[in-house]
Image (cartoon, rainbow, N blue to C red):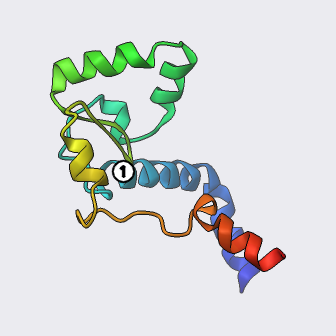
Amino acid sequence: MLVQFIAVIFPYWPLLIVLALLSRLVRNKFNHGLNKYPGPLAAGFTDWWRFIDVYKRKPERTHIELHRKHGDIVRLGPNVLSFADPTAIKTIYGLNKGFTKVATHPLLNVRTYFSHTL
């Protein structure tokens, strides 16, 4: 049964790879709820444009230009937003503001780690 399935699918493997890649890009663009924020077109699909921008050693200039063009909140990647308004820091990082913080970060558990190893 599995051999028959593989025999049927094998001729179409390039198409399946392209479809998987396209579905991943579309999911990146629309599934995270950040598609309402403006930014470069490629930012919604992939982080590769940011990699190239950092590789060119000019991301700070790019961020400033994007904020001038799009406003205080700019989408820089599928899961990345950039905030230009300093008052947003208190809203995002303040206590009990509705944003989930990582509770299991290794640096937060240093005391627990050392107490168990001693």
Binning the other alpha carbons within 10 Å of mark 1 as few (below 14), some (14 to 19) or many (20 upward) gives few
Quadrant containing the N terminus is bottom right
Q: Give the quarter of the image for residue 97.
A: bottom left
Of all residues, the one furthest to the bottom in this rendering is 1
Q: Give the quarter of the image for residue 16.
A: bottom right
In the foreground, 105 or 113: 113
* Residue type indicated by callout 1: Val
Q: Tell me if residue 14 comes above or below residue 102 in the rendering.
A: above
Q: How many marks?
A: 1
x, y percentage for residue 60? 40, 18
x, y percentage for residue 41? 30, 31
Left or right of 60: which side holds 111? right
Q: Tell me if residue 58 comes above or below residue 71 in the rendering.
A: above
Quadrant containing the C terminus is bottom right
Where does label 1 land, which residue?
26
Left or right of 110: which side holds 72? left
In the foreground, 48 or 71: 71
Find numbered disc 1 in the image and state the secondary structure of the residue it sits on.
helix
Left or right of 8: which side holds 95? left
Q: Tell me if residue 117 comes above or below residue 61 in the rendering.
A: below
x, y percentage for residue 47? 47, 37
Residue visible at 21% across and 43% down in the picture:
88
Residue visible at 62% across and 68% down in the picture:
109
Of all residues, the one furthest to the right in this rendering is 118
Residue visible at 38% across and 45% down in the picture:
78
In the foreground, 101 or 13: 101
